[in-house]
Image (spheres, grey):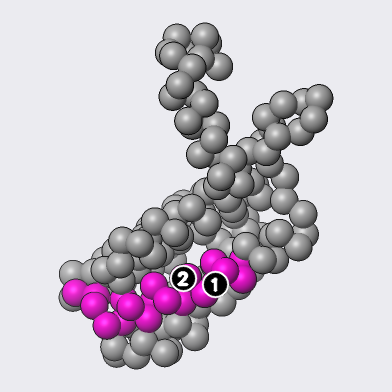
């Protein structure tokens, strides 16, 4: 890899070590370093922790979101409801949650969620491509937004569920 990228081995080793620590790469005897695979139990555990983190972010956003951030959430929801393209819906969903993470005002939480997001990339495309999912996402987002607008931290946290966190 270092030769292919025309760089020294040290940054490549560091990057591989970091990706292994984050669970994105693993070492297999006779194969070397490979892209990690997740077992069913790993996936369920990953989503369970992600749900808690996203819920915490929504609760914090209910306390800290500015009117500009609330309006950004509204605008994202409007844009999402105007399209049927799964790729665009997925992008709107990503942006919706990114605004919530920003509004939470907790960079440690945001970094942790990003690590989980990277691990979820191993699972393939988001579930927004499944029939009926865009409508479910819109409904969940409306409830989350209403709770954030009303400064209802518990409500915002409650409306984050496995289905909505699976879409990021």
Check the image and report above or below for 124 versus 67.
above
Query: On the image, which quarter does residue 21 sit in?
Result: top right
Label 1 crowd bin: few (<14), some (14–19), many (20+), radius 10 Å: many
**Residue 85, magenta (yes or no):** no
Residue 73 numbered tag: none
Segment colored magenta? 47-66
Check the image and report above or below for 93 versus 8.
below
Residue 51 numbered tag: 1
Q: Position of residue 45 (x, y in %)?
A: 67, 66
Q: Which residue position is annotated with label 2?
A: 54
Label 2 crowd bin: few (<14), some (14–19), many (20+), radius 10 Å: many
User: In the displayed structure, does residue 118 sit left or right of residue 28?
Assistant: left
Between 81 and 1, the residue placed more toward the observer is 1
Could you tell me which secondary element the residue under label 1 belongs to? Answer: helix
Residue under the point 48% across and 53% down: 115
Between 42 and 61, the residue placed more toward the observer is 42
């Amino acid at each position: 890899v270092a030769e292919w990228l025309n760089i020294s081995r040290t940054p490549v080793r560091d990057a591989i070590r970091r990706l292994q620590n984050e669970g994105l790469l693993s070492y297999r005897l006779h194969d070397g370093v490979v892209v990690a695979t997740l077992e069913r139990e790993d996936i369920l555990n990953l989503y369970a922790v992600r749900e808690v983190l996203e819920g915490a972010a929504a609760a914090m956003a209910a306390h800290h979101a500015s009117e500009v951030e609330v309006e950004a959430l509204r605008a994202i929801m409007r844009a999402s409801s105007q399209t049927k393209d799964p790729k665009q819906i997925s992008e709107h969903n990503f942006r919706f949650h990114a605004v919530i993470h920003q509004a939470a005002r907790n960079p440690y939480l945001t970094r942790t969620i990003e690590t989980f997001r990277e691990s979820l990339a191993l699972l393939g495309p988001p579930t927004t491509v499944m029939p009926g999912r865009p409508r479910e996402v819109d409904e969940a987002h409306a409830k989350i937004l209403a709770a954030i607008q009303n400064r209802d931290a518990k409500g915002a946290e409650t409306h984050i569920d496995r289905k909505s966190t699976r879409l990021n």
